[in-house]
Structure formats: C-alpha cells, structure tokens
Image (cartoon, helix red, strand yellow):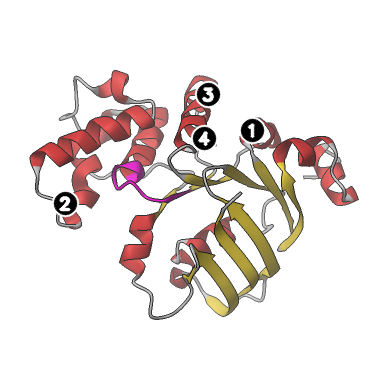
Amino acid sequence: MTNKIIVDHLFLNYSDGTESLKDINLNIPAHAITVLFGPAGGGKSSLLRVINRLNELADVVFLSGKVWLDGENILDPTIDINHLRRRVGMVFARPVVLPMSIRANLIYGLEIAGEKRQSVLEEAVERSLNQAALWEEVKDRLDVPAVALSGGQQQRLCLARSLALQPEVILLDEPTSGLDPISTGKVEISLQELKKLYTIVLVPHSIQQAARVSDYAAFFLQGELVEHAPGKELFTKPHDKRTEDYIEGRFG
C-alpha cells in the first residue's frame, strides 16, 4: 500500500477559539476511497480544506504540522497553490456551476491553465462527463446553460469539472447530501471506478454511505482522530467505544 497523503501532527485553531484539529496523524492510501466520518464539528471538512489550502481563506489563528503529498509538504509557504489545486481537486456539498454552458463549465479550468487545443478540450469534456456518470444525460445539450440541469446533475457536473483537470486527488465534502437516491447511487458507482485513477477522500452524508463506499475510514470527534482502519474492519469491529456508539446511533 502506497500512501498518497500523510498528515503529520496537524493542529488547527480558528479565531473564535474553537480547536478544530488536535494532533491529527493520518495516512491516506493512493487509489482508494478514504472516508472521514463523525458528528458535525468534528474537523472533517477542516482537514479537507487544509489539504486543498482553502483554510487560508478562513480565520485561522494557529496551524502547525505537515501534510505530505508524494513526499512534498504542501503547507510549505513557498509552494505554488495554483499548481497544488490542479493536483488536488475539491467538490463541495452544494453545487456551484458557472453561469455558462455545460461545455464551458468543463473546459474553463483547462483554458485558464493555457490549453487551447480543441481536440484536447473536447476529449476532456466527454471523458470527465463519462467519469461522473453524466455523459448519456447531457451529450446532446452541451451548449445549454448549466443552471438548466437538475440539482443532482449539477452536482455531478461539478465533479466532472474537477475531473476535467485530471487531478491526482479528489476531495469530496458531502457531495451527495442534496441528491435523490438514484443520483446518489450513480455518484457512488462512479467513485468505485474513479479510485482506479485517483486518490479519493470523502466526507459522506451518512454513516450508511460511509460503510458502503469506504476502503479506509477515519472517525473524527471534536477535532480528534479517534480511530482509523480499513472500512470493513472499522464498521464491523471498532476498537474504541466512542466509534462503536456513533456507528450504532447512540449519539450523533
């Protein structure tokens, strides 16, 4: 097992006094789905934002530790953040499509990066839509406004937009929280295929989803990483009583 990301003694405090992350140590394997689960406010989304360096847009007053991506500390202040965010894509719970066509949404990032070859752009459109299980639904209307899509389709479009850049890592923060069961199922099936190409870190919208999709799982509680293990092991034989209580619905 090769680790794509290694979180090393990570601490994070916000200006309001909340300590969001407390000495987090976590290995995230390549080409697998690692699920971060636990009650709200546990630090899961904060960790995703640190990996994508979005934490710098929040009121962070203290950050220490290292996050290694293929042996490079991405928290080093000299790192090229734009290059990092091309390597590490992120999809949020609420879909935010650009006010342009479906096609333009997908090639926007590539064009910003300087790609002008039409053949490359068209290939990226079809590839990313297929990977996000959306191609068959929209292939005949790529030039209609993206806002015309349903909520579930917009969320998959946001996933496809991230995939168009062919990142190495995909961070997903409750990407199916607002979707119907059919759309949720399509996204989950897509993730099983996508992990062959990418490393995926997912904050699920339910404990059931966490158990369904995880290769590895990490339980967060009030900023602490309580337990981390292969998904099948963690959801059937957790070692910590707090993990067991949460999985069995004794608190949430």
CA–CA distance between discs 4 and 2? Answer: 28 Å
> Residue 207, relative to residue 243: is it above or below?
above
Q: Which residue is mark 1?
A: 209
Q: Secondary structure at mark 4?
A: loop
Q: Is residue 125 left or right of residue 250?
A: left
Mark nearest the camera among 4 and 1 is 1
Q: Amino acid at mark 1?
A: Gln
Q: Which residues are magenta?
A: 162-170
Give how far apart the Cα atoms at labels 2 and 1 are: 35 Å
The residue under label 4 is 176
Q: Position of residue 119 (x, y in %)?
A: 11, 37
Find the distance from the CA under tag 4 to the CA under tag 3. 9 Å
- Residue 111: mark: 2
Task: Give the vertical position of 180 relative to 250 (above or below).
Answer: above
Query: What is the CA distance from the residue labelled 1 to the residue labelled 3?
Result: 10 Å
Per the image, the residue denoted by label 3 is: 185
Residue 75 x/y as whole percent = 48, 74
Closer to the chain start, of discs 4 and 3, is: 4
Label 4 – label 1 distance at C-alpha: 10 Å
Query: What type is the residue that disc 3 sits on?
Result: Gly
Q: Amino acid at mark 4?
A: Thr
Measure the alpha-carbon separation of dots 2 and 3: 31 Å
Instruction: Find residue 175 and report its horizontal and vertical position in percent.
Output: 50, 40
Tell me the kind of residue under disc 2. Glu
Local crowd at mark 1 within 10 Å, few (<14), some, or many (≥20)? some
Residue 15 in view (yes/no): no
Residue at horizontal 26 percent and vertical 45 percent from the top? 98
